[in-house]
Amino acid sequence: MEAAEADVQMPTFPLPQETASVERTAETPAVQPPNAAWVYNRASGIAVFGLPNSEGLLTIGCDEGGTLTVTRHTAATEDGKTVLVLTGQNRSASISLEAVETDVGPDHVWQGTVGPAKQSLREVFTENPGVVTVSIGEGTPLSVPASPEPVQAIDACS
């Protein structure tokens, strides 16, 4: 999978501030596929949540320029833009995403870079025991464990 071309700018959406307390009121329950787990690759600095031998469902890692990138591997509409929201018991973070072409899976997936929200993203995984809910618009939320692997990827991208 290739990231957006270097001359393409990521969309800017106003990002909600992190909150000390988040109340979950989602109508659609989050799902976590059986046997899905986080894996961190030290060589690439990328954490992948997904099933064994798959491209993953959620990827967090550095691009070649040292920018933290988050990819939600689910079908995206060409030229689409949205916001990914990660919500735990105590913190939340939002990331602007745009559709990028991919060679694996659907034609386009959602991808965005993390700038000022990097610390908020880290806190979602370090200050939330249990699970983190990953949501995009009206789609079914994904439930991922709050574990060390995404934190390793975030920290490796300094």
Image (cartoon, helix red, strand yellow):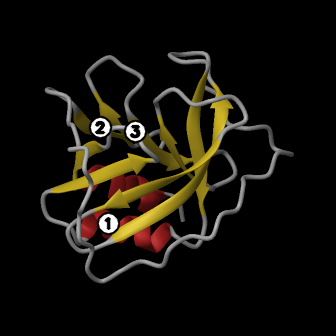
- Report the front residue among 111 and 136: 136
Q: Amino acid at mark 2?
A: Val
Q: Residue furthest bottom?
A: 20
133 left or right, relative to 80: left
- Between marks 2 and 1 in the image, the one whose residue lies nearer the viewer: 1
Q: Which mark is residue 39?
A: 2
Identity of the amino acid at label 3? Gly
Type of amino acid under label 1: Val
Residue at x 82%, y 45% (from the top left corner):
8
Residue 13 visible within the image: yes
Query: Residue 139 bears which disc, if any?
Result: 3
Which residue is depicted at the point 21% across and 30% down?
36
Which residue does the numbered mark 1 point to in the structure image?
124
Tell me if I can see residue 46 in this picture: no
Q: Quadrant of the N terminus?
A: top right
> At x 28% / y 52%, what residue is drawn?
133
Percent coordinates x, y for residue 14 in the rendering = 62, 70
Q: Earlier in the sequence, mark 2 or mark 1?
A: 2
Q: Nearer the viewer, mark 3 or mark 1?
A: 3
